[in-house]
């Protein structure tokens, strides 16, 4: 059974940083592209960043490029999202998702990020 457990969300002031983590189990993590998707209240899901199985291919949404960094540790079955220079517009529930591009699979339960002064 695929399990994705996100953590690291919270309340942070504008300009602050958070590091999200996703613990994966139940599948061959290193063989899967992984994606971070966020959903703000009242809005649809928004793709944030994706990373290839070996970490060699990485991409970001324009709105987070230069501020967010995706990474993974295949030895630990962990996916990360380092978020710097956070803005109120980054407020959302962040989900760890298996797959990449238009082929998304399993979703975690999400971790909430609130950027507010």
Image (cartoon, rainbow, N blue to C red):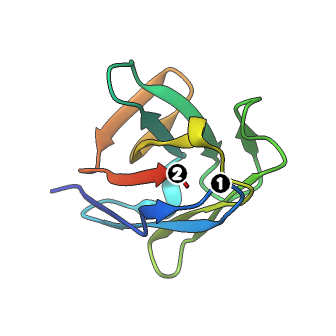
Residue 8, percent across and down?
Answer: 43, 69
Mark 1 neighbour density, 10 Å: few (under 14) some (14–19) many (20 or more)? some
| Label annotation for residue 79 | none
Residue 22, percent across and down?
Answer: 41, 64
Give the residue pinned by disc 1.
Answer: 14
User: Is the C-beta separation of discs 2 and 1 under 8 Å?
Assistant: yes
Residue 37, percent across and down?
Answer: 47, 37
Seen from the viewer's position, the closer of residues 43 and 54 is 43
Mark 2 or mark 1, earlier in chain: 1
Extreme residue toward the left, this view: 1
Extreme residue toward the front, this view: 117
Question: Residue at image x 39%, y 61%?
Answer: 28
Give the residue pinned by disc 2.
Answer: 116
Q: Is residue 72 left or right of residue 85?
A: left
Q: What whole-number distance in Å separates the C-alpha atoms at marks 2 and 1?
A: 6 Å
Extreme residue toward the bottom, this view: 76
Question: Residue at image x 56%, y 69%?
Answer: 19
């Amino acid at each position: 059974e695929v399990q994705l457990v996100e953590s690291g969300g919270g309340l942070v002031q504008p300009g602050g940083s958070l590091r999200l983590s996703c613990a994966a189990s139940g599948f061959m993590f290193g063989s899967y592209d992984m994606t971070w998707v966020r959903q703000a209240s009242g809005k649809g899901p928004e793709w944030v960043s994706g990373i290839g199985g070996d970490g060699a291919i990485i991409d970001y949404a324009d709105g987070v490029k230069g501020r967010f960094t995706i990474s993974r540790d295949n030895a630990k079955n962990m996916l990360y999202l380092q978020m710097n220079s956070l803005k109120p517009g980054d407020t959302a529930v962040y989900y760890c998702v298996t797959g990449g591009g238009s082929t998304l699979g399993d979703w975690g339960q999400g971790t909430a990020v609130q950027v507010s002064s």
